Image (cartoon, rainbow, N blue to C red):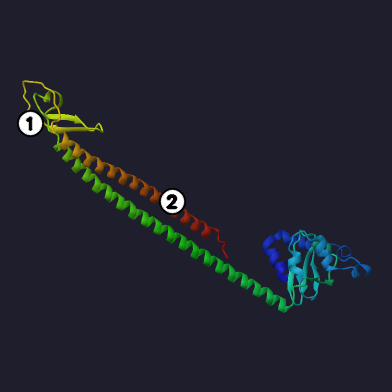
């Protein structure tokens, strides 16, 4: 008991010793009250703790699954509970139990709490182990499922990137083909030049096809002193070249549409992959620390 008193002195200092000395110097008639026999017989530690504890720690400290008694010891206004089996417990000064037990020095009592037999405790421990193993397995399965989902999303991203590259290569090839067909189309334009075109377009003749696309070809026979109209002479060759050019241009437009669709698919695949990654990070943050 006295090592608890020393601990309280180290914690509270001189003020604690003054309180202890002042309480110990009170008249004997005040400190040691004469208790009738009925008072002694009415001592019940469980009822006192149940009805008066205000620190919410007395029951946890005194309740045991046996009936080894606690003995009330006092030092001034302080109360200590001593047990041959469970050791000592210092009741807090501001707890309501202290105000009651200070008048019961030397009395003995217990607070019994049944905690099951050994078999019950073993069963409970096995249940805790099983629950823990189940939790570990669930976390393992969830981690495997998350990894599989991430792998699947990454495969989709890789396939979409390959498709985009394939479409880009197709568009580049078709653009070269369209440029070639366009040059072939321009070469079929034969101008019947009877004057000086450079007054309007330098040394180039201008012509608009059915798509209102500007085509121009250098003039080699302009007469500087005259101005005349320009017209296409070989329309058959032009129309044939125009059809080939138009077919290549339509194919180019289709490939550009395929490229746009592939880029949209890639964007969605990347968004899905980022979403799955964020879900995995949130799952890790939500795991409680042991």
Q: Secondary structure at mark 1?
A: loop
**Is residue 52 in view?**
yes
Q: In the rendered structure, which disc, 1 or 2, sits on the residue that comes first in sequence?
A: 1
Please give left or right for residue 227 compared with residue 265 in the image: left
- Residue 40 placed where, x, y %? 90, 69
Q: Is residue 153 above or below residue 43?
A: above
Q: Residue at x 28, y 45 (%)?
A: 251
Question: In front: mark 1 or mark 2?
Answer: 1
Q: Residue furthest front?
A: 236
**Is residue 36 in view?**
no
Q: Residue at x 45, y 59 (%)?
A: 150
Q: Secondary structure at mark 2?
A: helix
Instruction: Look at the image and tell me in which quarter the C terminus lies.
Output: bottom right
Q: Is residue 18 above or below residue 38?
A: above
Q: Residues within 10 Å of mark 1 (few under 14, many from 20)?
A: few
The residue pinned by badge 1 equals 220
The residue pinned by badge 2 equals 271
Q: Nearer the viewer, residue 27 or 260?
A: 260
Measure the alpha-carbon separation of dots 1 and 2.
Answer: 58 Å
């Amino acid at each position: 008991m006295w090592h608890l008193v020393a601990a309280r002195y180290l914690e509270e200092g001189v003020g604690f010793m003054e309180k202890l000395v002042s309480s110990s110097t009170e008249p004997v008639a005040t400190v040691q009250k004469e208790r009738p026999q009925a008072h002694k017989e009415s001592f019940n530690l469980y009822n006192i703790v149940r009805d008066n504890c205000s620190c919410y720690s007395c029951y946890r400290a005194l309740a045991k699954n046996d009936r080894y008694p606690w003995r009330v010891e006092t030092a001034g206004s302080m109360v200590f509970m001593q047990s041959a089996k469970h050791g000592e417990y210092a009741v807090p000064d501001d707890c309501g139990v202290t105000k009651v037990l200070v008048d019961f020095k030397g009395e003995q009592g217990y607070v019994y709490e049944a905690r099951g037999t050994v078999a019950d405790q073993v069963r409970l421990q096995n249940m805790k182990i099983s629950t823990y193993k189940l939790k570990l397995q669930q976390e393992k399965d969830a981690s495997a499922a998350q990894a599989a989902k991430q792998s699947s999303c990454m495969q989709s991203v890789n396939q979409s990137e390959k498709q985009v590259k394939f479409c880009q290569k197709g568009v580049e090839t078709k653009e070269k083909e369209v440029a070639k067909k366009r040059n072939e189309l321009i070469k079929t334009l034969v101008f019947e030049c009877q004057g000086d075109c450079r007054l309007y377009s330098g040394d180039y003749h201008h012509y608009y096809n059915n798509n209102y696309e500007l085509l121009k070809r250098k003039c080699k026979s302009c007469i500087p002193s005259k101005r005349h109209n320009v017209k296409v002479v070989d329309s058959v060759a032009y129309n044939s070249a125009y059809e080939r050019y138009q077919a290549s241009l339509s194919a180019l437009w289709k490939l550009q549409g395929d490229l746009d669709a592939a880029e949209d698919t890639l964007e969605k695949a990347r968004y899905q992959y980022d979403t799955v990654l964020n879900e995995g990070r949130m799952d890790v943050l939500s795991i409680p620390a042991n």
